[in-house]
C-alpha cells in the first residue's frame, strides 16, 4: 500500500513537470523567436484574419496587415533585446501566454491568446504593455 502511494506521488509530480512543456509544445517556437528578434513579418504569419491588438495604451481590432505594420513600428521604436516566457496555459484548443519583453527603451509585458484551428495556430489577441518589473 505504501509503495503504491509513493509511486502515485512520483507519477503525479512527473506529470506536473511535463505538463508545462506539453503546453509549450503547442505554441510554435517561431512566435517566441519572432518576439525575441523583433520580427514582425514572422509574428504576423500567426495573426488571425482580424486580431485584437493592444500596444501600450492603444487598443483596437485590426486586420492582419494593419496589425503587422503596427507591430513593425513598435519594434522599430522599441528594439527587442530578449523575450522571456513567464507563464502559459491552455483550455481546450486555446492557449494563453504571458511573457516579458526587454527592449532598448524598457520592459514590456506581453499577453497573447492563441487558438488552434485544425493544424493551424492563430494569435487572436496580442497585448504589449509597459511594465516596471
Image (tube, rainbow, N blue to C red):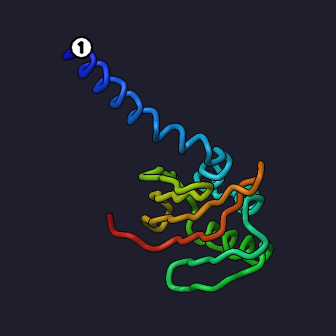
The spot of residue 89 in percent (x, y) is: 48, 53
Could you say which is closer to the camera, residue 15 or residue 65? 15
- Above or below residue 38? Residue 69 is below
Q: Quadrant of the C terminus?
A: bottom left
Mark 1, secondary structure of its residue: helix
Q: Quadrant of the N terminus?
A: top left
Task: Place residue 3 in its image quadrant.
Answer: top left
Q: Residues within 10 Å of mark 1 (few under 14, many from 20)?
A: few
**Residue found at the very far left of the displayed protein:** 2
The spot of residue 8 in percent (x, y) is: 31, 24
- Above or below residue 60? Residue 120 is above
Q: Residue at x 80, y 74 (%)?
A: 65
Could you say which is closer to the camera, residue 105 or residue 85? 85
Task: Place residue 72 in its image quadrant.
Answer: bottom right
The spot of residue 75 in percent (x, y) is: 62, 66
- Above or below residue 61? Residue 107 is above
User: How many numbered badges does the structure rendering display?
Assistant: 1
Could you say which is closer to the camera, residue 48 or residue 109? 48
Q: Residue at x 69, y 55 (%)?
A: 116
The spot of residue 10 in percent (x, y) is: 31, 23
**Residue found at the very far top of the displayed protein:** 3
Q: Residue at x 63, y 85 (%)?
A: 60
- Above or below residue 18? Residue 53 is below
Q: Residue at x 47, y 59 (%)?
A: 98
Reading the image, the residue beneath label 1 is 3
Could you say which is closer to the camera, residue 77 or residue 111? 111
Q: Using residue 45 as the reference point, say whether residue 108 is left or right of it.
A: left
Amino acid at each position: 500500500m505504501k509503495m503504491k502511494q509513493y509511486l502515485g506521488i512520483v507519477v503525479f509530480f512527473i506529470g506536473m513537470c511535463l505538463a508545462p512543456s506539453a503546453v509549450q509544445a503547442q505554441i510554435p517556437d517561431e512566435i517566441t523567436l519572432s518576439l525575441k528578434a523583433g520580427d514582425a513579418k514572422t509574428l504576423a504569419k500567426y495573426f488571425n484574419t482580424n486580431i485584437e491588438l493592444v500596444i501600450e495604451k492603444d487598443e483596437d481590432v485590426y486586420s492582419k496587415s494593419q496589425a503587422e505594420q503596427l507591430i513593425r513600428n513598435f519594434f522599430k521604436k522599441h528594439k527587442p533585446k530578449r523575450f522571456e516566457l513567464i507563464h502559459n496555459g491552455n483550455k481546450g484548443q486555446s492557449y494563453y501566454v504571458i511573457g516579458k519583453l526587454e527592449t532598448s527603451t524598457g520592459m514590456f509585458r506581453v499577453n497573447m491568446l492563441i487558438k488552434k484551428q485544425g493544424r493551424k495556430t492563430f494569435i487572436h489577441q496580442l497585448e504589449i504593455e509597459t511594465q516596471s518589473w
